[in-house]
Amino acid sequence: MKLFTIACGILLIAATPAQQPAKPAFAGPGTSVAAAEAFKSLNALNEARKLVVTFMGATRYSDLRAEHCFGWRFAGGLRILAESGGEYYGLNMSTVSPDGVSKEYHLIGVLYAEGPFLLERRPFRRGAYVIYSAPDELRVDRSIQEDVRSTLLPLKNKLDESLFGKEKGGPAPLFSFTQEGGHVYLVLGSNKFRLSPSG
């Protein structure tokens, strides 16, 4: 599968109330991480250009905002931090299959894990990840220059095409963390992916 990237300047604008659901009060296997705490850690990585790395190289994630940051601290101490603003940032990832079918993903946020973790039982290492979405698929790219590795997770419930804006500052899918029934999930639309420490 051939890969290529279309990169533009990244712009974050505060999401409208309809696009920015209230963060739930977490309970259960650990505790939520306050927005200010998540922002502090993510911003330090961002300033060092270690948060967003694509096929085009490392870049600074412009206008990273505390109000878009969140995270989870599991009972064993593992922190997983993330940012997603519900706005189109102006960076896409496109793929072309061997039979010529193309698919475009919008960058919808970032994630940083301080240790190994599982997402829907798939193993991930410690480090930064860029989160993309297409209407029918979630894409998780590990942020290591010259070693960008992708994990694709199908969406059982497709996202509305209207969520994928064409202009910077337009709408984009929003992901978040939630806790239900003693488990933590990454939520995208009505799709839930279980999130847990590895091991």
Image: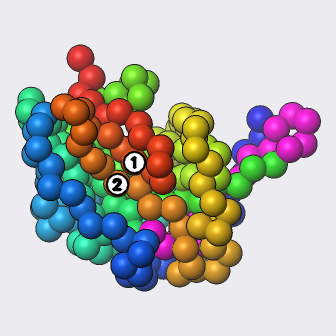
* Dot 1 crowding, Cα within 10 Å, few <14, some 14–19, many 20+: some
The residue sitting at 41% across, 55% down in the picture is 175
Distance between the alpha carbons at the discs numbered 1 and 2:
5 Å
Can I make out residue 56 in this image?
no
Residue 162 on image: x %, y %: 65, 69
Name the residue that disc number 1 marks.
187
The residue sitting at 47% across, 44% down in the picture is 191
Circles 1, 2 touching at the beta carbon (< 8 Å)? yes
Residue 74 on image: x %, y %: 14, 36
Disc number placed over residue 196 in the picture, else none: none
The three-letter code of the residue at mark 2 reads Ser
Residue 177 on image: x %, y %: 30, 49
Name the residue that disc number 2 marks.
176
Residue bounds of the magenta highlight: 86-101
The three-letter code of the residue at mark 1 reads Val
Relative to residue 46, is residue 120 depicted above or below?
above
